[in-house]
Image (cartoon, grey):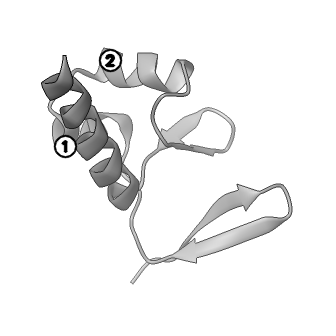
Amino acid sequence: MRLTCREATPTTTILTDEIPLNVKEAATFLGVSRQTVYVWVERKQIPHLRVMGRNIRFLKSELDSFRASFKQEMENE
């Protein structure tokens, strides 16, 4: 089991046993292109983690929630 740290607030850290996904894995999971994921990250529309400044990672549990809300928005249009 791998533990990863996630910054919840500037002074709090959450430990989780999830293995973070990279951009390619997140794009595949969400069914979109890597470029779309990068755009969402830039616009702060998708929950993500920054590792060592530039590396972007995603927790699958957060992507599940994001995907559900994204699908609901698409159905409402």
Callout 2, which amino acid? Answer: Thr
Q: Residue furthest front?
A: 76
The residue shown at (44%, 22%) is: 40
Residue count near mark 1 (Cα–Cα under 10 Å), binned few <14, some 14–19, many ≥20: some
Quadrant of the rendered structure where residue 44 is? top right
Q: Position of residue 35 (x, y in %)?
A: 33, 15
The residue lying toward the viewer, choosing from 62 and 69, is: 69
Quarter holding the N terminus?
bottom left
- The answer to whether residue 71 is left or right of residue 12 is left
- The answer to whether residue 12 is left or right of residue 19 is right
Residue count near mark 2 (Cα–Cα under 10 Å), binned few <14, some 14–19, many ≥20: few
The residue shown at (40%, 54%) is: 62
Q: Position of residue 60 (x, y in %)?
A: 33, 56
Callout 1, which amino acid? Answer: Phe
Residue 51 is marked as none
The residue lying toward the viewer, choosing from 77 and 23, is: 77
Q: Which residue is mark 1?
A: 29
Residue 36 is marked as 2
The residue lying toward the viewer, choosing from 75 and 35, is: 75
The residue shown at (49%, 42%) is: 47
Q: Is residue 70 above or below residue 62?
A: above
The residue lying toward the viewer, choosing from 8 and 5, is: 8
Q: Earlier in the sequence, mark 1 or mark 2?
A: 1
Quarter holding the C terminus?
top left
Q: Position of residue 66 (x, y in %)?
A: 34, 43
Identify the element where label 1 is drawn. Answer: helix
Tally of numbered tags:
2
CA gap between label 1 and label 2 equals 13 Å
Q: Is residue 1 above or below residue 56?
A: below
Identify the element where label 2 is drawn. Answer: helix
Quadrant of the rendered structure where residue 71 is? top left
